[in-house]
Structures are given as C-alpha cells and as structure tokens.
Amino acid sequence: MRAQPKASHFINGRYVEDTAGAAIDCVYAASGEVIARLHEATDAIVEEALAAAKAAQPAWAALSGTERGRVLRRAADMIRAENRSLSELETMDTGKPLQETLVADATSGADALEYFGGLAGSLTGEHIPLPGGDWAYTIREALGVCVGIGAWNYPTQIACWKASPALACGNSMVFKPSETTPLSALRIAEILSEAGLPDGVFNVVQGRGAVGASLITDARVAKVSLTGSVPTGRKVYAAAAEGMRHVTMELGGKSPMVIFADADLDKAVSGAILGNFYSSGQVCSNGTRVYVERSVREAFVARLVERLKAGVVMGDPLDEAVTFGPMVSEAQMEIVLGYISQGIAEGAVVAHGGKRADRDGFFVEPTVFTGVTDDMTIAREEIFGPVLSVLDFDTEEEAIARSNDTVFGLAAGVFTQDFARAHRVVKAFEAGTCYINHYNAAPVEMPFGGSKLSGVGRENSKGAIENYSEMKAVYVGMGDVEAPF
Ligand SMILES: NC(=O)c1ccc[n+]([C@@H]2O[C@H](COP(=O)([O-])OP(=O)(O)OC[C@H]3O[C@@H](n4cnc5c(N)ncnc54)[C@H](O)[C@@H]3O)[C@@H](O)[C@H]2O)c1
Ligand SMILES: CCCCC=O
C-alpha cells in the first residue's frame, strides 16, 4: 500500500520538497507497513512558508468577507465531493476505521469551511454613540500570519478547524501537522488552492516539535493555535507569550461522565462507548472516568460488556465492516498497555479486554476497569486509548466534587432523566464542553474547548472569530476639543 504525496510541504500554492530534512516515515497502523516517506522542513522551508504567508496576507485581508467566504465554501463542496478518497487517506494516516472517517473527519472539516465561509461576509465592527455627539466605531481586523500545529488523532479536522476561522477573518496560515499523521493536511491545502485560495494564504510544512517551535517565535507570526498535549501546550504558550502572541490551546483531558440511576441505561452505555472507544479511544474529550450511581453499576457494566462483545469488529480499518482500529502508532500502543498494567498493579479489576490484541498492527483491546478509585493513575492521567474506568458514587454532590477533582477541564457529561438535575450538574462542572444525555458530539455551531489545564480559547462557533481577529477602536470627535491648558 502506498500513500506517497507529491512532496512533503505545500507552500505558495505548490508542492515543495527539500530532502535535506530528516525523514518522517508514515506507518499504516494496522500492519506496521511504511506507506510514505516525507521530510521535515529545513530552516529554508520554514523561511519560505513564513515569507509566503506574510506576503499573501494583506491582499487576502483586503478582499471582502463575502469573497473570502466564497473560496472556503467552494473548498467545502470539493471536500464533500471527494469524501471517500479523503477518508481513505485519513484511515491510512491514522488507522481509524473507514466507517468512522467517512462520517467524522473530512465531513467535519467541510462543515467548518462552510460555516466560517458563511460567516465571513458578516464580520463587521460596530457603531458606538457617545455623549455630546461624539461617536466611536470599531473595525474587526485580521491578526496577520497564524501558525497552526496539529495532533495526530483528527488530522483533517484539526487542519480545517484552524484554517477556517483564521482564513475567514483574513489571516494567512502556516500549518504543521503532527509528524505521526502528515498526509491529509497536504491534500486539504491542495483543495483550498484549487478552490481559488490565493497562493501563500494556507501553507503546510512537516516536522517534529522543533519545527513547530521554530515557527512560533518568528517575528512575523501573530497567533499560534495548538492542538496537542498539556506538556506541549505549556511550552508553546510560554514561547508565544514572549512575543505577546495570541493563542488558542486545545489540549488534553481526563473528563468525567456521570450516570445517575434514573438514566436511560442504554443511552448511557452508548454515550460511554462514544466517549471511550470511538477512534480506539484516541479522542481528547473522552469521558474516561465513568461515575455510575452505585445501585445501577452492575447493570451498567453488564450491558457495556455485552455491547462490546457484540459490536467490536477489529480488522483492517479500510474494510468498512470494521468498527475498531489500532492505536495510531507502536509508541501510543505501548503507552496504553503501560497504563493498563499500572491499573492492574494498583488494584483495578479488568471487566473486559486488558491486553494487546492477538493480530498484526498496533491493536489494544477495548478495556473496561471496575473497582477503580480516584487516586489510581488510570483515573488521574490522560491515557488516550480505549481504557474506560468505572467508579461508584452515592450522591450528586459527591459525583460533582469528584468529577471536578482534576487539573483538566476539557469536557464532562451527565446522563439522567431529571432535567433540573442535569442542568444543575453541568452548571457545576469545571469543564469547557459539557453534554447532557449525549457525549462527544462536536457540531461546528457549538464552541469546543477546555478550561483549567485543558486549554485557552475555543474552536468552532461564532466565538472562534474572536480568537482570530482583533478590534481596532476609533474615537470620532465631532465638536470642540477641551484641554486643561
Ligand atoms: N482539546 C482538543 O481539541 C484536542 C484535540 C485532539 C488532541 N488533543 C490532545 O493532543 C494530545 C495527543 O496528540 P499528540 O500526541 O500529537 O500531542 P503532542 O503534544 O505530542 O504534539 C502536538 C503537536 O505539537 C508539536 N510539538 C511538540 N513539541 C512542540 C514544541 N515544543 N513546539 C511546537 N510544537 C511542538 C508536535 O509535533 C505535534 O504536531 C492529547 O493530549 C490530546 O488530548 C486535544
Ligand atoms: C469530539 C471531537 C474531538 C476532537 C478531539 O480529539
């Protein structure tokens, strides 16, 4: 199987190569086979990308929002028309089942381009009347050159969630995908170009952390948007602060899901499956600490295990019948297996799964732990794999306090048929993205992002516009200028 792109980078409307950069091998996670070899950006490539983005931005910002939006919406249509081949590429890049990528990756990217393309024409400032006939107005302005840095779990979606609001506001972007999944952002850049995006407005460079770091501190860069882990977020935020750059930080989590005894148990089990085993558990907002009211805990676990036994089909993720794929890489598989061993060593009980699957590729069985306590490592640290921990609780107050007892604050969910309780509980959650009787839906119309260590700023929704533009305020004096002397 080969998925070799035309070249490693896409700059100024064309593919660019520099084989002097260290090699990046792209591995098909279901087999371990190398399917493409790319090269890290050298200093010359980074310079070319930043120079292109800087040169292209003023003319792009000078177009009307409607003109910019038209390009984004055209790209959205092209992505939808090409959904199958983009989904296959995403599956090869990440190992996620085609059954998932067909509905959750390129389509989510297209939604973002369509949504922000639609908003672009309505981005305006405001008129502010003031005493004595004076007035003020505001002008919404682009920030300039934005840097986007992506994680490996949703490479197409992340590229589009960052590019769409940035470009709608008149910024340009240099995007660095994760070195683990370098392929799909290149095709997104190519599609944007074919849709009429001026050369240099969206550029893709490959590389590991050092390439990302070299982009952030360049004087031409006005904003950095990272999707990644908390440790990386700390470094990127600190580096951006040195130049007082704007940031969006979409980071990790250890989110709670609270299931009350009055919940529709089948819905709650579905929520727990979506929030733990979709994308083989490699989703930032996963609700991996599942607090179940003691009286329904056994019934919940029994139904969950039954559904896993009946529904998990492991195999080649390019086969549409497969529902559960491998970890993205051997390294991620080892991290997840390490956490499973630690859970067992600390006294948690494996109710399902608990080991590497007996097949080629980086597959870990979907794993359910019971007997988990809040102090165990598997209940405190982000695992980023298919490992669900069941914890008991007795009262609403206790469930809320234990849910919030974490440094993270990305997401949280509650399952109950008592809506007064549902709204009370989500109000008390210390998390940026909350769910009632659902989990992990991320429609573009809704803000997405985290509190506490899980992030800064929000992606998607009208709110993202605030994160990719700034207001210039203009005071207009209409009368005399009174001065003290
Ligand atoms: N909140 C969200 O929306 C969201 C979405 C997806 C993933 N994530 C998080 O991402 C993590 C998994 O992804 P990952 O393993 O790719 O994360 P990571 O932090 O290892 O890497 C993220 C990106 O940062 C780059 N990077 C690393 N060091 C850097 C540095 N010093 N300067 C600049 N860039 C640097 C990497 O090359 C990569 O492109 C998880 O913690 C997950 O929760 C968050
Ligand atoms: C539910 C959308 C998830 C994106 C982060 O991993």
Image (cartoon, rainbow, N blue to C red):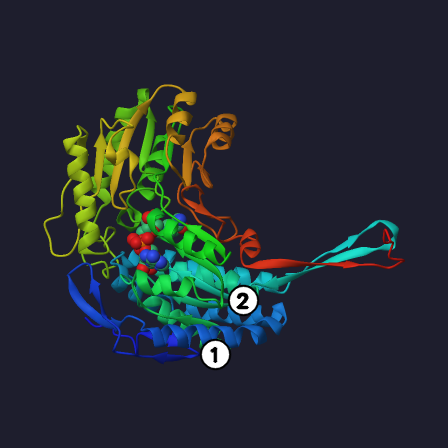
* Residue displayed at 45% across by 38% down: 431
As displayed, is residue 378 above or below residue 217?
above
Drawn side of residue 42 relative to residue 316, left or right? right
Drawn side of residue 304 relative to residue 346, left or right? right
Residue to which mark 1 is pinned: 199
Give the image location of residue 418, x and y in percent: 48, 26
Q: Amino acid at mark 1?
A: Asp
On-image quarter of the N terminus? bottom left
* Residue displayed at 61% across by 68% down: 65
Residue 190 visible in the displayed image: no
Drawn side of residue 422 relative to residue 373, left or right? right
Residue to which mark 2 is pinned: 144
Viewer-proximal residue, 331 or 107? 331
For ligand 1, tell me if the residue under mark 2 lies within 8 Å: no
As displayed, is residue 312 above or below residue 236?
above
As displayed, is residue 168 above or below residue 462?
below
Quick one: SS at disc 1?
Answer: loop
Viewer-proximal residue, 93 or 438? 93
* Cα distance between the residues tagged 1 and 2: 15 Å
Viewer-proximal residue, 197 or 12? 12
Give the image location of residue 48, x and y in percent: 41, 77
Farthest-out residue, right: 480
Quadrant of residue 263 within the rendered picture: top left
Quick one: SS at disc 2?
Answer: loop
